[in-house]
Amino acid sequence: MQKITSFTIDHDLIEPGIYISRIDSDIITFDLRTRKPNSGNYMDNVTMHTVEHMFATFIRNSEIGSKIIYFGPMGCQTGFYLLVRNFSPSLTVKFVIETLEKIVNYEGPVFGATRKECGNYQNLDLESAKRECAAYLEVLKNSNNNLKYDNY
């Protein structure tokens, strides 16, 4: 059976950053790697879940909201997937940074944190999401964000 593209990348060489993992016609899949894979430092479920709620809500309500196809966590607990339709990769990075800044500076209730809105609404913590987003924001601000996996 043929391997999917992401399994052909040596995950031991991946550093935190933002990468284009695939392009399908007009849809670009970005890997938002908040942590180094296979390092033993993984996101806990509360953090992933809260970042998902906050990031998805903010970016879908941004100027590029109509271009967003999907935002969600990686099962390996080292980041998130962002799928964008027909939009510039460099501008996507700009909006990712702006969205992270909004989360870090946000004061208020977690979006979608009620029983009606979420299947595990008690599994959310804004402070853990803010810490995750602040750390990732520093990575992106101090990177060249060339969007390419070096070993790909």
Image (cartoon, helix red, strand yellow):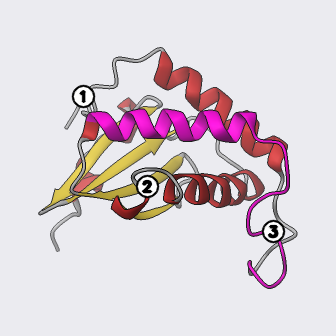
Q: Determine the residue positioned at 43% across, 59% down.
A: 65
Quarter of the image for the N terminus: give it.
bottom left
Q: Residue type at mark 2?
A: Tyr
Point 39% across, 52% down: residue: 64
| Element on which disc 1 rests | loop
Question: Mark 2 to mark 3: distance in Å?
Answer: 21 Å
Left or right, residue 68 beside residue 106:
left
The location of residue 75, given as percent across then percent down, is: 53, 61
Residue farthest toward the top in the current orientation of the protein: 142
Q: Is residue 92 magenta?
A: yes
For the residues labelled 1 and 2, the Cα–Cα distance comes to: 18 Å
Residue behind mark 1: 150
Stretch in magenta: 90-118
Q: Which residue type carries mark 1?
A: Asp
Residue type (three-letter) at the residue carrying disc 3: Ala
User: Helix or strand or loop: what does disc 3 sit on?
Assistant: loop
- Farthest residue, direction bottom: 116
Tag 1 near tag 2, CB within 8 Å: no
Which of the marked residues, 1 or 3, is nearer the chain's N terminus?
A: 3
Q: Is residue 9 left or right of residue 106?
A: left
Closer to us: 34 or 133: 133
Q: Is residue 136 above or below residue 23?
A: above
Residue 31 placed where, x, y %? 39, 47
Crowd tier of the residue under label 2, counting other residues whose Cα lies within 10 Å: few below 14, some 14–19, many 20 or above: some
Compare residues 44 and 3 and report the one nearer the observer. Answer: 44
Task: Please state the horizontal and vertical placement of residue 3, each as a whole percent of the image.
Answer: 21, 64
As drawn, the label of residue 113 is 3
Residues 20 and 85: in front is 85
Name the residue at 50% across, 60% down. 60
- Does residue 36 appear in the picture of this structure? no
